[in-house]
Amino acid sequence: MIDRLRNVDYDIVVITGDFRAKTRGRFEPAINALQSVLPNLNKPVYAVLGNHDSLRMVPGLEAAGVRVLLNESVVLDRGGDTIHLAGIDDPHYFRTDNMEKAVEGIPPDAVSVLLAHSPEIYRHAAHAGFAVMLCSHTHGGQICLPGGVPLVLNASCPRRYCKGSWKYHGLYGYTSAGSGVSLVDARFNCPPEITLHRLRIR
């Protein structure tokens, strides 16, 4: 991962949750592992928590240089042009997402991007007026049939929202297959990914 990151040109980093593989137990090893990656990332780094993460991880993540968005938003400014970046807490397992709180302070006509761990919140994101939603959770299936057809996606939404790029009404979304694994330490017909998104004005 570190070798791949060195060859990518980008402005900000976003991480859409699941810093660890297990929902319970110690989380310090995950934060320690992340600290070996962070020196190789351009700043700033924003993140949301996933269904395997704990709220108790936030102080350690932020001390390491990761700004965790807990149902809130920040303004990204570049030469006077702004993008509102919002993040909601895990909508899949803990169901602690609060879209209303996340959009507070975002003007209706602003360009806004939502970070969410799971694609399951796509309808709410579109209704809230977000232009883009970036998420993960599904691992792209992780174990897939030939052609990349997932056996299991573990998300309560249509399969088309569970891997790669998608669109719902005016909302553009991307569900990353991620760079790690869950439950089984293997991937089959579903390589890990680090995704570079370029936002353009239409």
Image: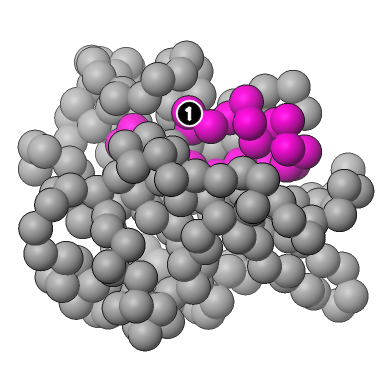
Q: Quadrant of the N terminus?
A: bottom left
Residue at image position (82%, 66%) is 82
Quickly name the residue at label 1.
120
Residue 201 placement (x, y as % from top left): 86, 50
Compared with 60, 129 (above or below) is: above
Q: Is residue 172 visible?
A: no
Q: Quadrant of residue 149?
A: top left
Magenta part of the chain: 119-139
- For disc 1, the neighbor class at 10 Å (few under 14, some 14 to 19, many from 20) is some
- Which element is circle 1 on? helix
Residue at image position (52%, 63%) is 69
Compared with 190, 23 (above or below) is: below
Residue at image position (25%, 79%) is 36
Give the residue type at disc 1.
Glu
Q: Quadrant of the C terminus?
A: top right
Q: Quadrant of residue 174?
A: top right
Residue at image position (62%, 70%) is 11
Residue 196 placement (x, y as % from top left): 54, 54
Give left or right: position of 65 versus 172: left
Give left or right: position of 139 versus 98: left
Of 91 and 117, which appears nearest the observer?
91
Of 128 and 178, which appears nearest the observer?
128
- Confirm whether the magenta stretch covers residue 28: no
Residue 198 placement (x, y as % from top left): 67, 53
Q: How many marks?
A: 1
